[in-house]
Each structure stands twice: as structure tokens, then as C-alpha cells.
Amino acid sequence: MTNLKNVNVIADYDQAGHQWKKYGYTELPVMRTDAEGKIAGYSGMKIEVQKVAGTTEPFVRVSLPDSQAFVPFEAIDDILEGMQKRMKDTFPELAKGEGFKIEKISKKVSRGGNTCHWIVQTNITETIEGSFKKNDQLKLGFCISNGYNTGVALGVKLFTMRLVCSNGAFAKGADLAANTIKHIGDPVALLKTFQTSLLNIVEEWTELLQVYNKMAQVKLTEKAAKYIYQSTRKGWDIADRFFPDYYTIAEPKKEKTQKEVQEKAKVPIPVPVIGLTAKGKSVTLWENFNDMTFGLWRAQDEQEEKYTDENGKEKTKVRKAMAFDGLVARELRLHESIKYVAEHPEEFK
């Protein structure tokens, strides 16, 4: 069992911050003490204490570095309430025809409640030109991310829902790095900057569709398959099980003695050899992308998986659900990898 004990932490209420008072938060600098228990200055950390309506005692919502701005999830909820009107006011063309609507907002919480993603789906529909599927339509939207000291920045990403298979995908799109805001500085000013970035995301939809249309025109090659596989090995790896069966992934022989020799000689351990079947050489990057996001999107739910044990008996195990921030990170990496191939096909012939 975990050995849990109370530790006295001294906070300076004279320096309390009340910028998020409407949501019940008080920000308090944490002090450090010496061996005699006397105050020895600021610790460089702060805590966000929250008092929830209907409760008697406040609690520590999160502790984080003093230099890191805190933006509560509740503030994002408030922004989204009036988002439809703000988008119409900013982009009058969205009010034409049937008019722009935000059809659905889904909240995905992970990392013990300290990371949140808001998936915003709109009624704007576009069709991928030259897709392997007839009338391959996408619903356009965006995804907001925010984290409390989890490494997830306050930001907004493009999001599409493919209607033919109810498959969601995340993308940075073109020049979207500027729309990922680090949690540094004045939190109120940070939130205003975020609102501007959120409105500007609409202008990126067209560029994202251009990328998808390129994917639909470019064939997958063995060189491209190798690049896609290797470029998704960094950070949040995409496991082999998510690669379509038209990928051939030949694992190198793993012998303990060989590994020890290689480690001593500082020789890299062999990586899998990636190839394609005949079917693989006939698919487009768009088909490859969707074959992989199909599995990734559904990995956010627990799944039963059959396997054969060492005695040849067929058994079933339950694979745990993938954390939502891990899903987002993997899909972003996949998108950037395939996007590069689509935009530089001459490199992968």
C-alpha cells in the first residue's frame, strides 16, 4: 500500500491571488522552511485551492511552479458557451445558408483529472476529392487542450470526424504551432490570446482539407511505409498492432547475448524491417491514414483481444483503454508523418 502521511505546507495568504475567484479558486504561494521550521523564503511553487459550492472545506486542486500560469477548466467551459455566436460574428460567411452551428462538445478527462480535452464538432461538412471511398465526407471541428502541470499546454488543434466510419482525427494543420500556448505569464491575458487563436482556427480548415486531398492522390510506397513507421517511434510510440496488415514488420532476432555485445560495443540494436504487400502498394496515403486512425480512435475504450498462449490454447485478454492525451499525441504524430510524405512524394519513390 502507499504510505500516505500529512505534511505541513505553509502558504502566504497575504500574497493570495483571486483572478479565478468566480470559480472558487485561490492561488497561494508556498513557502519553504529551514531545519528549525522557520520561514526561509518562497519555495518557487504555488497551490490552487478550490472551494466547491455545496462543500464546507476548500481543497488543493493542484500544485505547480510559480512561473506557470493557471487557467481553470471552468474558464474554457464559459468560452465555449458563447463560441457559436463569436464565430459567426468574426466570420460572417459562416452565417450563410443553413448557418453555422456547434453540434456537439465532448469533454475527455485524463491524468487523474488534471488534463482535459474538449472536442468541438460543427455542422460544416466537406468531401475528400478522389478518396478511395465514394462521398467520403468529414465534419470539421477543433479540439481544445488544457492541463494542470501535466505538460499539456492550453491550445487548440484541428479535429475532423469522418462520417463513413465515425472516426475522429487530430491535426496541427498549417502553421498551427502558434496556436499552442505555453502556460507562462498572466493567466487572464493568456486566456484572451487563446480566444483569438480559437477564432483563427477556422481559417486553417481549408489548408487541412488541401493536405487530406493530397493524401488521397499519393500512393503508399515501401520507402514511405518505412518513414511512417520509424517517424512514429519517438515520444508516444504507435504500436505495431495499429499498422494495417498490408505492412510487413519483420522483427530482428533478439538474443540476450547479441544485445549485451551490442550494448558494450555501443552498436544500435537492429530495428524492424518494414515492407508492403501487393495490396499495400495499391493504397493511398489517405487510406493508410484512416486505417490507422480507425484503430487508434477506438483504443480509447477497453477491448477484448484473443491470443494463443505458449501451449497453443486460444485465450482472451482485456486491453486497457488508451489515455486520451496519449491518443491525441499519437494521432498528431501520425498526421505530421503522413502529411510530410504527401507534400514531398518525390522523396519516397
Image: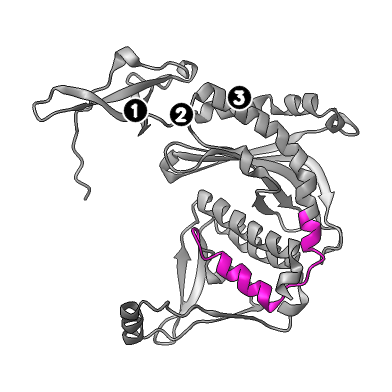
Q: Residue 251 or 113: which is nearer the viewer?
A: 251
Which residue position is annotated with label 1?
A: 46
Q: Which residues are the magenta region?
A: 211-236
Which residue position is annotated with label 3?
A: 192
Q: CA distance from mark 3 to mark 2?
A: 13 Å
Looking at the rendered structure, the kind of residue marked 3 is Lys
Q: CA distance from mark 1 to mark 2?
A: 10 Å
Q: Residue 127 or 34: which is nearer the viewer?
A: 34
Which residue position is annotated with label 2?
A: 70
Looking at the rendered structure, the kind of residue marked 2 is Phe
Badge 1 marks a residue whose secondary structure is strand
Q: Can see residue 243?
A: no
Up the image or down, 288 lies above or below 35; here it is below
| Residue 218 on the magenta segment | yes
Please name the residue shown 48% across and 31% down the image. 184
Mark 3, Cα crowd under 10 Å, few <14 / some 14-19 / many 20+, is few
Residue 10: x and y in percent read: 23, 23
Sequence-wise, the earlier of marks 3 and 1 is: 1
Residue at the top extreme, as displayed: 14
Residue at the right extreme, as displayed: 97
Looking at the rendered structure, the kind of residue marked 1 is Lys
Say left or right for 282 vs 110: right
Up the image or down, 94 lies above or below 292; here it is above
